[in-house]
């Protein structure tokens, strides 16, 4: 990589401070996978279309393949590993399992993070709203019905607990 510029990056990833020297053009997805070994962040299309690289940066879901890691300087990155470890999406994960919404699992991390963003707003979204919110995340195995079922069931269960 002739002419590559190295940058020092310090950010918080899944609650832990990370300091690394990286190539300035390293994407968030590549940083997480290649430097930190967090393989739940996938790369599919590398054009921000498929959603497999979805992570949360400073509380907002983003496409990790489109964002440069240096843009996270001083910020917070949450991956599927971190969100899963906190228990925040345990009920959503359980509903994905119960409704066979996993299939091959390649899209699942991005689907879960995107669905959680919708569910965090509260209430019970319509099936059309769920489909719309997940429309930027591709799944080639399930046909989306099981995924929508899982998100809807989670929303309904959370609404009854409030």
Image (cartoon, rainbow, N blue to C red):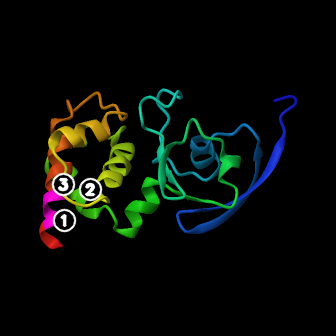
The N terminus is located in which quarter? top right
Residue at 48% over, 53% down: 60
> Please, which residue is most extreme toward the bottom here?
162
Question: According to the image, label 1 marks what residue?
Answer: 158
122 sits to left or right of 26: left
Q: Position of residue 141 (x, y in %)?
A: 25, 30
* Residue at figure coordinates x 31%, y 51% from the top left: 118
* Picture layout, residue 119 above or below residue 160: above
Position of residue 31 in the picture relative to residue 96 (left or right)? right
Position above or below: 89 against 42 = below
Q: Is residue 100 visible?
A: no
Task: Judge whether residue 68 can be spotted in this image.
Answer: yes
What is the secondary structure assignment of the residue under circle 2? helix
Query: Considering the numbered disc 3 on the image, is that residue within a helix, a strand or a loop?
Result: helix
| Within-10-Å neighbours for mark 3: few <14, some 14–19, many 20+ | many
- Compared across the picture, whether 122 is left or right of 49 comes to left
In which image quadrant can residue 154 be found? Answer: bottom left
- Residue 114 image offset from top left, x and y in percent: 36, 47
Identify the mark nearer the N-term, 1 or 2.
2
| N-terminal label among 1 and 3 | 3
The quadrant of the image that shows the C terminus is: bottom left
In this orientation, which residue lies closer to the viewer: 52 or 33?
Answer: 52
Instruction: Give the x, y percent position of residue 111.
Output: 33, 44
On the image, the x and y values in percent for residue 9 come to: 74, 55
Task: Give the spatial CA distance, label 1 vs label 2.
Answer: 13 Å
The verdict on residue 121 being magenta is no
Distance from the alpha carbon under mark 2 to that under mark 3: 5 Å
Range of the magenta residues? 154-159
Q: Secondary structure at mark 1?
A: helix
- Location of mark 2 (residue): 93
Asked if the residue under mark 3 is in contact with the one under mark 2, i.e. CB atoms within 8 Å, the reply is yes
Which labelled disc corresponds to residue 95? Answer: 3
């Amino acid at each position: 990589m002739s002419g590559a510029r190295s940058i020092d990056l310090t950010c918080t990833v899944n609650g832990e401070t990370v300091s690394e020297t990286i190539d300035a053009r390293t994407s968030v997805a590549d940083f997480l996978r290649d430097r930190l070994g967090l393989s739940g962040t996938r790369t599919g299309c590398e054009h921000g279309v498929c959603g497999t690289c979805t992570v949360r940066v400073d509380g907002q879901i983003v496409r990790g393949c489109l964002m440069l890691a240096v843009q996270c300087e001083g910020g917070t990155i949450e991956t599927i590993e971190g969100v899963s470890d906190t228990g925040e999406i345990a009920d959503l994960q359980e509903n994905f399992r119960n409704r066979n919404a996993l299939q091959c699992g390649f899209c699942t991390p991005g689907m879960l993070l995107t669905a959680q963003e919708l569910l965090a707003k509260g209430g019970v979204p319509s099936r059309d709203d769920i489909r719309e919110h997940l429309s930027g995340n591709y799944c080639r195995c399930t046909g989306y019905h099981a995924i929508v079922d899982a998100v809807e069931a989670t929303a309904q269960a959370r609404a009854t607990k409030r």
